[in-house]
Amino acid sequence: MKVSIESRRVPVWDLPVRAFHWALLACVAVAAATGFLFPANWLSVHIWAGAGVGALILARLVWGVTGTTYARFANFTLSPAAVIAHLKDITAGRMHREGGHNPLGAWMVVTLLAVLLALVASGAVLLGGLFKQGPGKGFLSFATGDLMREPHELLAWALLALVAAHVAGMAFESWRSGENLARAMVTGDKADGFVPAARAFTARRGLAAALVGIGGAALMWAGLTANALPPKGVPQVVADGTWQKECGDCHMAFHPTLLPAASWARIMTSLDDHFGEDASLPADKVTAIAAFLAANSAETSDSFAANRLRRLNAERPLEITQTPYWTRRHGDIADAVFKAAPINSRQNCAACHGDAASGTFAPQSISIPKETTK
Amino acid sequence: MKQNIMALALVTACLALPAVAVPAVAGPRDDIVAGFAAAAKAADPAFTGFDAARGKALYESQNTASAESPSCASCHSASPLKAGKTRAGKAIDPMAVSVTPDRFTDLEKVEKWFGRNCNTVLGRECTAIEKGDFITYLSGL
């Protein structure tokens, strides 16, 4: 059904609304691509895209109470009566061209903003608790972060569905009204003859700039301050010289937080048969190393690696590379990749995990090196 | 009296053998080799000196005590002039003294690794003669 469109163009979407819309799309696209498709070492890009989404939405909330007529939330027709009337119009084939969002469109925008904010919030909790990064690192436990993994993923799928519905609704209304709504979000104007908004507003640019500036600066300061806190439940391990030297002779000195105390104790009392090798040490060195490992074992740390690796393979409780998490996460890497230089073995964590020596194992630090010829 | 003769033999061995087995300048490695020579002589009065050929044979010998590490060459590389690699993939500096000059200059380290690796590869301790032969071989490459 087409209705006649008047040729005079009237400004509807102001520049901040349009800039917000397309910048948000860019950030969401990057966050979705890195979250759904890309390997884990793209986490930093995902984080910055998510931070961008959060910042854009906060700015949009300010503009929603300070912007021009169609940017204002006061002109969003969200009442159930308006929605029902709109649905009746559609089924009856009646067309009321709106200047701003129709009631379903307004609900779509509100829902998208809410889901995106929830995604940013759950992502920040995940990041803080699991990886001890970002503003939550000083407050959040691994368990709290872990709780947010499923909601974050479900929200991401919900977002994809909402985006699809948003585009479908826009296309449907464009077809019904004869007005290219996507184009309107680029140029900012619509053909005259639409139903104008209930209330006209002039933008309060100064107030908006002040709110965004001061609020943004305050948030930035709070975020940076929180980001500088020590990670909750992850005490700094001061490397013991004997441990570093003796355990680092044949393989990297595996961080003490990577195995529970009971495993370390068994390793230190069976050095004469250390995975088939005699790795005996004088008694005084055994005592010193065993004490260091016991004092800094997985039980003492809430780090990502300590939490992930503390569930052991019951048959082979001394081997980090046999833990269920380890085998699951490395399962798609071919045996030949591990054996080829410069990795050489599964025990050479540091070949691919740049931060393995510190026991951190951040996703961003993963980089499988190119094979070297020898 | 018998003890005195033993002591004299030890001292003689310490003084005499380094001059035969290794180059002129005495150093920590000479002392270590001399120590093994003394022990070898003490264990077997017929001992006359270390032999690089026996050391080479030991280095290259294939043994059955360990499936993963049947030979010195398994980890230390077939050529002692080249870097080796532990089972865990960590690089080991070449064993040849000509390539890694500080090899066999720290007695504690020498005994630690003979202790561990002879037990792993051969399933027993190495004798003083074997240790001396081994060092003699790797010092002359």
Image: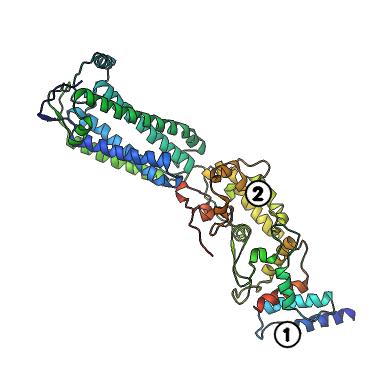
When asked about the image quadrant of residue A218, the answer is top left
Give the residue displayed 59% in from the left and 75% down from the top.
Answer: B99
Does residue B6 show up?
Answer: yes
Give the residue type at disc 2: Trp
Describe residue A28's horizontal placement relative to residue B124 as left or right: left
> In the rendered structure, the residue with mark 1 lies on which chain?
B
Task: Name the quadrant of the C terminus of chain B.
Answer: bottom right
The number of numbered discs placed on residues in the rendered structure image is 2
Mark 1 closeness class: few <14, some 14–19, many ≥20 residues within 10 Å? few
The residue at the far right in this view is B1
Identify whether A254 is placed above or below A8.
below
> Where residue A97 sits: x, y (%)?
18, 22
The subunit carrying tag 2 is A
- A316 or A86, nearer to the observer: A86
SS under mark 2: helix
Q: Residue at x 58, y 52 (%)?
A: A346
Picture layout, residue A362 above or below residue B23: above
**Where's residue A232, x and y in %?**
49, 42
Residue located beneath label 1 in the image: B20
Dot in front, 1 or 2: 1
Q: Tell me the crowding category of disc 2: few under 14, some 14 to 19, or many 20 or more residues within 10 angstroms, Cα based.
A: many
Residue A206, percent from left and from top = 18, 37
In the picture, the disc for residue A264 is: 2
- Position of A227 compared to A82: left or right? right
x, y percentage for residue B54? 75, 75
**Measured along the vertical axis of the image, is residue A344 above or below residue A258?**
below
